[in-house]
Image (tube, grey):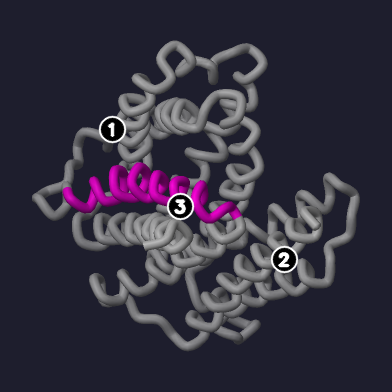
Amino acid sequence: MNSKLSGILTTLAGGFLWGFSGVCGQYLFERKGANPQWLSAWRLLFSGAVILLIAFPLYKKDIFKVFNRKNIIPFLIFAFVSLMGCQYTYYVAIAASNSATATVLEYISPAVVMLFICAVSKKLPTPVQVIALVCAMAGVFIMATGGHISSLSISRTALVWGLISGLCYSLYTIQSPSLSALCGLLPLLGWGSIIGSIPLLIINHEYLFSYAPPDVSGVLAFIGTSIVGVILGFGLYVKGCQIVGPVTGSLCASVEPLSSALVSFLWLGTTFKASDIVGIVLIVGTVVILALDKGREKNAVEK
């Protein structure tokens, strides 16, 4: 197998596992009586601790760079808004709808990042970027209303929290490259997850120990949201991007909402209306359009 193909398959596997972890969360909510606060708190704490255990032999004393004075404010924003905010709102949206809907709504983030970059650079969006933005807005509209402007096709709770999740994920996308360059990727994720779990642990302290996954399938689903989704999924995605590059990697990441929809349909019997499928295609199309446009810009610069 050539390296490019192995990189693509590795990146696709990472995106698939991300989508699978969302369905594991839906399973815990629908079948095992968990709530988003419990899952978000323990998932962040558990996955953060495992990441730091992996990172310590690699980084040694540099594992504490995130707490340097010049890094601490951006890091706390990353921990409390980018990481905790993104994961908590994502699971609230799943609990109010399903994994596929929440994942697709979260994927408005590429369009939000594009608008942010245009605003910071004081440049108007290109025609291709405008098309991508229209696709994202149309996808959200169709999924939210089913194509009927007078009514909502999904609950208001799912729509609001799903869109907030997309905004938090946008901030994560904007912050993580510069912060990981200063602190290291694994320390940033490990400490960010642990610190980000603290508000949820405090606010939800009465429920934290009154619930536990009631059987083996519940424990496996929790492992699916943390170890499989966060560590294996993210690790495979990063490894794949190192081989094929960020443009191809971001295209492969589009498999996440598709895998979430497929797994939730096959495993949990989640059904989707025609309008849902159209919305999914439009929002995933946003990611594809922006990634291809970014690839063309990169090639033009290199020439």
Q: Which residues are magenta?
A: 220-246
Residue 205 percent location from the top left of the image: 31, 30
Quadrant placement of the C terminus: bottom right
- Measured Cα–Cα span from mark 3 to mark 1: 41 Å
The amino acid beneath tag 2 is Asp
In the rendered image, residue 86, in percent from the top left (x then y), is placed at 51, 46
In the picture, residue 13 is in which quadrant? bottom left
Q: Are marks 3 and 1 in contact (CB under 8 Å)?
A: no
- In this rendering, the label closer to the viewer, 1 or 2: 2
In the picture of the structure, the residue carrying the numbered disc 3 is: 240
Going by the image, does 91 lie left or right of 252?
A: left
Mark 1 crowdedness (10 Å alpha carbons): few <14, some 14-19, many ≥20: few
Cα separation, mark 1 vs mark 2, equals 49 Å
**Mark 2, mark 3: which one is toward the viewer?**
3
- Main SS, magenta region, reads helix
Residue 240 image point, x, y percent: 45, 52
Q: Nearer the observer, disc 3 or disc 1?
A: 3
Q: Secondary structure at mark 1?
A: helix
Q: Which residue lies at the image location 44% right of the left edge and 26% below the top edge?
A: 191
Distance, label 2 to label 3, CA atoms, is 20 Å
What kind of residue is marked 3?
Gly
Q: Mark number for residue 293?
A: 2
Q: Is residue 52 visible?
A: yes
Say which quarter of the image contains residue 160: bottom right
Name the residue type under label 1: Glu
Percent position (x, y) of residue 74? 64, 27
**Residue at x 41%, y 53% (from the top left corner):** 91
Asked if disc 2 and disc 3 are in contact, CB closer than 8 Å, the reply is no
| Proximity of marks 1 and 2: CB atoms separated by less than 8 Å | no
Q: Could you tell me which residue is drawn at 16 percent across and 47 percent down?
A: 219
What residue is pinned by disc 1?
Answer: 206
